[in-house]
Image (cartoon, rainbow, N blue to C red):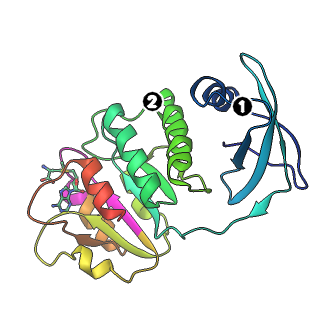
């Protein structure tokens, strides 16, 4: 279960409303059950359920331990976000595959930027995906940013922009790359101005093959 902060040397932990709901109604936890807690920052703790009511679930946690897991290779994935239902699926996949940070991009051809309520739902999707796959660091989701502002920022790693064309890299070129920063365009594709700006800032075009993928498929391929 996810908790925002774990007591350093163990102690009482009151699960959040969402996590308690899952523990009580889905997992049907009972007093004395052993559970695992994680704080989304790489720490974990074993815990035992102390009390359960219809709405609250309290446990006693042991001291927290730093548990290093597989490092995330894609440190930034900048995506002109698809529609909410597809964004949810994409966030599940890329959290499992190991993206450190998702940056929603407002591209020149973005039709509707994601709303705050969609963004907060996606944070919950990240927590559930971490629990499902045993990831103990949350994927961060940044606030949406205009494509030009994003490309003008400085980024650390191998920079790629998914866009077909002559001379583009392929996924093979990234096989041994330890740190990747990747950008995926909207349904209508990047404008030539966006691609040129990105290239002038060190991004290289990458082709994912001859088929044109949906945003969420392209984002998933780049995260593997
Ligand atoms: N009509 C748009 C075009 O031709 O660019 C299609 C855009 S596609 C639905 C959405 C985004 O996914 C693209 O902007 C690109 O970033 C990425 N993408 C999809 N298929 C790709 C491929 N085969 N190679 C590289 N990028 C791809």
Q: How many marks?
A: 2
Q: Is mark 1 within 8 Å of ligand 1?
A: no
Q: Quadrant of the C terminus?
A: bottom left
Q: Nearer the viewer, residue 208 or 203?
A: 208
Q: Is residue 105 visible?
A: no
Task: Report the residue at 72% width, 31% height from top.
Answer: 16
Q: Which residue is mark 2?
A: 115
Q: Secondary structure at mark 2?
A: loop
Q: Tell me the number on the disc at residue 16.
A: 1
Mark 1 neighbour density, 10 Å: few (under 14) some (14–19) many (20 or more): some
Q: Is residue 43 magenta?
A: no
Q: Nearer the viewer, residue 204 or 146?
A: 204
Q: Position of residue 67 (x, y in %)?
A: 69, 66
The span from disc 1 to disc 2 (Cα, nearest Å) is: 24 Å
Q: Which residues are magenta?
A: 181-193
Q: Is residue 183 magenta?
A: yes
Q: Quadrant of the N terminus?
A: top right
Furthest residue in direction top, as rendered: 54
Q: Position of residue 44 (x, y in %)?
A: 72, 56
| Residue 6 placement, left or right of 106 | right
């Amino acid at each position: 279960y996810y908790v925002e902060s774990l007591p350093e040397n163990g102690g009482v932990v009151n699960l959040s409303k969402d996590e308690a709901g899952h523990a009580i109604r889905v997992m049907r936890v009972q007093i004395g059950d052993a559970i695992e807690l994680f704080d989304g920052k790489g720490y974990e703790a074993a815990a035992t359920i102390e009390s359960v009511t219809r709405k609250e679930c309290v446990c006693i946690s042991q001291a927290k331990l730093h548990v290093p897991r597989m490092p995330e290779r894609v440190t930034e994935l900048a995506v002109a976000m698809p529609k909410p239902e597809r964004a949810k699926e994409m966030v599940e996949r890329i959290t499992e595959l190991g993206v450190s940070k998702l940056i929603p991009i407002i591209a020149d051809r973005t039709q509707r930027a994601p709303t705050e309520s969609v963004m907060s739902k996606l944070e919950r999707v990240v927590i559930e995906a971490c629990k499902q796959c045993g990831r103990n660091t949350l994927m961060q989701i940044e606030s949406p940013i205009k494509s030009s502002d994003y490309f003008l920022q400085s980024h650390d790693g191998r920079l790629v922009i998914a866009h077909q064309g002559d001379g583009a890299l392929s996924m093979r070129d990234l096989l041994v790359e330890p740190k990747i920063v990747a950008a995926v365009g909207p349904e209508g594709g990047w404008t030539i101005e966006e691609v040129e700006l990105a290239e002038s800032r060190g991004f290289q075009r990458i082709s994912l093959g001859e088929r044109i993928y949906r945003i969420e498929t392209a984002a998933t391929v780049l995260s593997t």
